[in-house]
């Protein structure tokens, strides 16, 4: 609903349950895929998706997702905690200051160089999505708003289309590599699918300020926990 993806909440929970980095990333990504499919269906009904842009961005993000799945197999539990802790910290800061960051991002013509940079960033988002199982909304949405000039009413829905295609590619690659815990993924995906339907409908009218503050602070606290765990494991 606020454009960062449910995986950013789910993955820490899976890690604390003791799943390996590859199981955490792949299981989380399956839930992300379920969420993005559900959201894309609902946003499609609302006619809020820019299909051409979503597909163009996915063309850059999908190779990153495939690469991220392969890289995840080389992460130790300690390195996963460090890198994911840093990602959580950055995400928490983004969520807290999202309105300021995205202020005055009304649609306007952007330079070709900035557009190229936005598409290049989606490749990195694909890697992050598949490497940690969190989705790439934290990169997709700002890129669409600040660089490509979409309104928020179209950026979040379009990012879900991109994420749907990207996460499915990542899930297939993780599956080929034998990473997922399919039982846990099925249970989580069922809940994620329903939650995404509710969130995508609520996004039209919801007041997000309090939710953003609470989520941002929670992510920063969890990020600090991950980084401390990494430091104490040395």
Image (cartoon, rainbow, N blue to C red):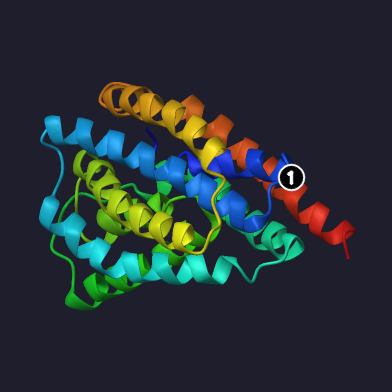
Secondary structure of the residue carrying numbered label 1: loop
> Looking at this rendering, what residue extends furthest in the bottom direction?
113
Q: Residue at x 47, y 49 (%)?
A: 29
Residue lying at 24% horizontally and 48% vertically, measured from the top left: 161
Q: In which quarter of the image is residue 115?
A: bottom left
Residue 21 at least partly seen: yes
Is residue 6 rendered to the left or right of residue 53?
right
The x and y percentages for residue 38 are: 29, 34
- Examine the rendering and report whether any part of residue 4 can be seen: no
Crowding at dot 1, Cα within 10 Å, few <14 / some 14-19 / many 20+, comes out as few
Q: Quadrant of residue 220?
A: top right
Is residue 92 rendered to the left or right of residue 126? right
Above or below, comparing residue 26 to residue 35 in the picture: below
Residue at x 49%, y 27% (from the top left corner)? 211
For the C terminus, which image quadrant? Answer: bottom right
Q: In which quarter of the image is the N terminus?
A: top left
Q: Taking 167 as reference, is 73 left or right? A: right
* x and y, in percent, of residue 9 in the image: 56, 39
Q: How many marks?
A: 1
Residue at 28% x, 43% y: name it: 156
**Residue 233 location (% of width, % of height):** 87, 60
Residue to which mark 1 is pinned: 18
| Residue in the foreground of this view, choosing between 148 and 42 | 42
Tell me if residue 45 comes above or below residue 171 in the rendering: above
Q: Quadrant of residue 113?
A: bottom left
The image position of residue 163, as x and y in percent, is 33, 51
């Amino acid at each position: 609903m606020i454009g960062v993806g449910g995986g950013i909440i789910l993955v820490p929970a899976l890690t604390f349950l003791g799943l390996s980095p590859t199981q955490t990333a792949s299981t989380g990504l399956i839930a992300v895929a379920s969420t993005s499919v559900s959201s894309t269906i609902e946003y499609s009904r609302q006619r809020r998706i820019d299909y051409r842009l979503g597909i163009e961005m996915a063309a850059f993000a999908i190779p990153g997702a495939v690469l991220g799945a392969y890289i995840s197999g080389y992460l130790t539990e300690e390195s996963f905690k460090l890198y994911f802790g840093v990602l959580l910290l950055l995400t928490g800061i983004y969520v807290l200051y999202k309105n300021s960051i995205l202020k005055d991002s009304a649609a306007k013509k952007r330079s070709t160089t900035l557009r190229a940079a936005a598409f290049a960033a989606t490749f990195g988002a694909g890697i992050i999505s598949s490497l940690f199982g969190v989705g790439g909304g934290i990169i997709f949405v700002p890129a669409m708003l600040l660089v490509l000039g979409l309104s928020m009413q179209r950026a979040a829905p379009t990012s879900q289309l991109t994420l749907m295609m990207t996460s499915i590619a990542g899930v297939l690659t993780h599956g080929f590599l034998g990473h997922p815990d399919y039982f846990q993924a099925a249970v989580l995906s069922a809940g994620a699918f329903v939650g995404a339907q509710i969130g995508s409908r609520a996004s039209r009218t919801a007041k997000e300020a309090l939710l953003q503050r609470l989520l941002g602070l929670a992510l920063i606290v969890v990020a600090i926990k991950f980084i401390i765990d990494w430091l104490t494991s040395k």
